[in-house]
Amino acid sequence: GTSTTYDDNNGIILLNLTENNVRGKIQSELFLTNTDMRGLSLSGNGFFGTVPSEIGTLTQLQYLSLANNFFTGTLPTTFTKMTNVDQLFLDGNYLSGPFLPTVGTTMTNLESISIYDNQFSGTIPESLGNLKNLNTLYMDINRFTGSIPASFSDKMKDLRLRNNQLTGSIPDSLWNNNNSSLEILYLDNNKFTGTISTNLGQMTHLHELHLHMNELDGSIPTEVGFLKELKTLYMDNNKLSGEIPTEFGELTVLEQMYLHKNKLVQSIPSNIGKMENLRDLHLYTNFLTGSIPSEITKLQKLKGIELQDNRITGTLPNLAQSNLEKILIYSNNIQGTVSQKICSNKGLTEFKSDCAGDDPKVVCSCCTKCV
């Protein structure tokens, strides 16, 4: 819909053209004749071409959204003259080149920056660390290279840098007390190396942690047990080694635990049975040994358990949970007959085990596939 608010001189103060099917290039007159504008949303339209340099005349602007259009090219250097902007949305365009290197020293009122799903390249500006009120930063799905800036605002709640080409280690400072307000962290699908800092445990308000699809090594810090509000944990597709910390048992609100495709060893800790909200457990393609702990039968909300491609022994516990939809235990050394309690579960749609051949390791009347 459209909404327009004017000032005493017939200049536009607020212009909202969100999802209005407007197409074409932005005319610079829009900016030059409305320099008192406080809010401008052109999101969800068909605007194309470059962002005009005259946008820098909107020095009173506080809210700017050009999201979900077809803008191309680099941002004009005049962009940082809009020093009063606190909400900036440029996501879902084809913008390229570096992202405002001086943004942190010029646009110091910024609270939210959303530039995901563009083609920005170069490094992430170090100056972002100067933005004292920045609480949301979405820079994901771009072509940024280099490392993460050493510091961000201590008000940061939601930081998303995934799907770039970032390298180096994740700085210790990112995990330290200054960022204890952080609730969501997406660093996945980059090229980060090095270990996960033990300072991770200081992020006690973290709800979501996405570190998957990197090249992280070393062990999972036991301090993970301090993340009592964590609901989603992705550490899969790295080079993590060592054992699964028993401290995972402290994460009683965790729903998704993805540790697959690493180099984890030893057995699955028995106090996994305390993780009462766990729905998805993915530990496949590691070097896990020992048997599946019987405590896993206490997880009443469990929907999927994927343990394939390990070195697990023993028998399959009586997984009679009514929510269970998927059990994958093939390519292990699990043996014995699968109990009728498991087979009587009507919701079980995918069940694969080593039940093929004349003398199978697993005898299973309800498996959907025998390997």
Image (tube, rainbow, N blue to C red):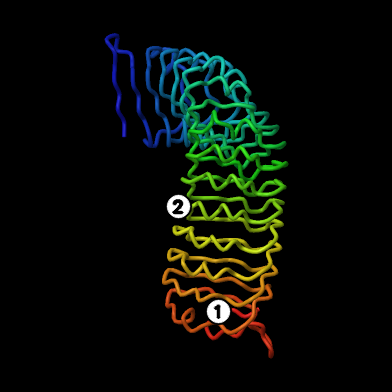
Residue 368 - label: 1
Label 2, label 1: how many angstroms apart (C-alpha)?
Answer: 31 Å
Rendered location of residue 110, percent (x, y) = 48, 22
Image height check: is 199 above or below 366?
Answer: above
Residue with the mark numbered 2: 253
Residue ranking furthest to the left: 8
Name which residue type carries label 1.
Answer: Thr
Asked whether 121 or 181 is in front, the reply is 181
Image height check: is 336 above or below 207?
Answer: below
Rendered location of residue 319, percent (x, y) = 49, 73
Query: Dot 1: within a 10 Å radius of its alpha carbon, few (fewer than 14), some, or many (20 or more) residues?
Result: few
Quarter of the image for residue 1 reads top left
Rendered location of residue 180, percent (x, y) = 51, 33
Residue at the image position 57 percent from the left and 38 percent from the top: 140
Residue at the image position 63 percent from the left and 71 percent from the top: 291
Residue ranking furthest to the bottom: 358
Q: Quadrant of the C terminus?
A: bottom right
Is residue 28 left or right of 219 when viewed as pictured?
A: left
